[in-house]
């Protein structure tokens, strides 16, 4: 089953109120952070690591700025994760989480992003019991922050459904995957790759539970969405 794992960068705009004074290190840190974000958006993950390390060093000089430090830790961890280096990524994610909680509060979407990044990392290593409560907490935060029909909610539902399928609990996975698909079909543009991912997730579950005709129908829909020029 396709694992619809997220790769989220924390938002600098959520780090402080508009009335708060800008910290003296902000211009240098922001310049590095923008460079990291631009390279990340271009999928140039290896090239993004040096400026991400510099941004982290800059943030560490001002440890009271929990938001900048949390984001820098998260972003460097994400780059390591995307390059298949989980041993480097995990301690960075674990350091970022409590800092994000201090900066934003325990129920902020930035905290959900940290939870999800850590959960997907350990889920991919087969550590399902550790990942489940992180996914559940991220889902609860996103539902509270965004409402029940937001694409980020669908992402958490999908990841949790994939986890339950992986541990042999398709009866728990199916309603989550169905709900994720419904949200994505409503909230995302037609042809969005996340819709195809949800269709394929459900198709894999249906095949595993002996519902081959239903699985084939979903696979055909997913393939049509992924066809050139859709």
Image: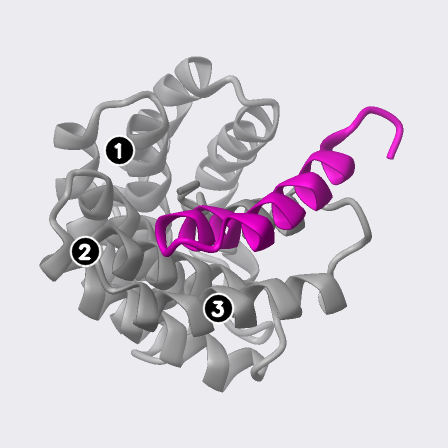
14 relative position to 97: left or right: right
**Looking at the rendered structure, which numbered label has been put on residue 16?**
3
Q: Could you tell me which quadrant the N terminus lies in?
A: top left
Locate residue 133: give its quadrant: bottom left
What range of the chain is rendered magenta? 201-230
Looking at the picture, does residue 182 appear above or below residue 193?
below
User: Residue 74: image x %, image y %?
Assistant: 32, 45
Looking at the rendered image, the disc whose residue lies closer to the viewer, 2 or 1, is: 2
Looking at the picture, does residue 172 appear above or below residue 213?
below
Give whichever of 99, 129 is nearer the camera: 129
Marks 3 and 2, how far apart in space? 40 Å
Viewer can see residue 200? yes
Residue that label 1 marks: 57
Give whichever of 170, 101 is nearer the camera: 170
- Asked if the residue at tag 2 contacts the one at tag 3, i.e. Cβ–Cβ closer than 8 Å, the answer is no
Residue depicted at 51% across the width and 41% down the height: 30
Q: Could you tell me which quadrant the C terminus lies in?
A: top right
User: Residue 3: image x %, image y %?
Assistant: 40, 44
Locate residue 191: give its quadrant: top right
Viewer can see residue 64? no
Give whichever of 176, 47 is nearer the camera: 176
Residue that label 2 marks: 167
Q: Looking at the image, how many numbered discs can be counted on the residues?
A: 3
Locate residue 102: give its quadrant: bottom left
Residue depicted at 16% across the width and 41% down the height: 90
User: Residue 159: image x %, image y %?
Assistant: 38, 57
Q: How is the image coloured?
A: one colour
User: Residue 134: image x %, image y %?
Assistant: 23, 65
For mark 1, give the secondary structure. helix
């Amino acid at each position: 089953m396709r694992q619809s794992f997220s790769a989220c960068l924390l938002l600098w705009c959520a780090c402080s109120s508009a009335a708060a004074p800008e910290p003296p290190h902000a211009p240098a840190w922001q310049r590095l952070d923008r460079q990291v974000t631009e390279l990340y958006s271009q999928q140039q993950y290896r090239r993004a690591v040096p400026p991400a390390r510099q941004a982290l060093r800059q943030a560490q000089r001002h440890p009271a700025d929990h938001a900048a430090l949390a984001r820098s830790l998260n972003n460097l961890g994400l780059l390591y994760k995307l390059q298949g280096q989980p041993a480097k990524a995990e301690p960075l994610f674990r350091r970022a989480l409590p800092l994000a909680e201090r900066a934003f509060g325990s129920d902020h979407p930035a905290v959900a992003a940290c939870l999800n990044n850590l959960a997907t990392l350990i889920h991919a290593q087969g550590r399902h019991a550790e990942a489940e409560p992180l996914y559940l907490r991220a889902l609860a935060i996103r539902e509270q922050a965004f409402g029940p029909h937001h694409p980020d909610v669908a992402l958490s539902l999908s990841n949790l459904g994939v986890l339950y399928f992986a541990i042999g609990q398709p009866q728990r996975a199916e309603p989550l995957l169905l709900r994720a698909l419904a949200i994505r079909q409503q909230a995302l543009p037609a042809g969005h790759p996340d819709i195809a991912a949800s269709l394929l997730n459900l198709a894999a579950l249906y095949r595993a539970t002996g519902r081959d005709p239903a699985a084939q129908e979903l696979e055909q829909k997913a393939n049509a969405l992924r066809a050139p020029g859709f």
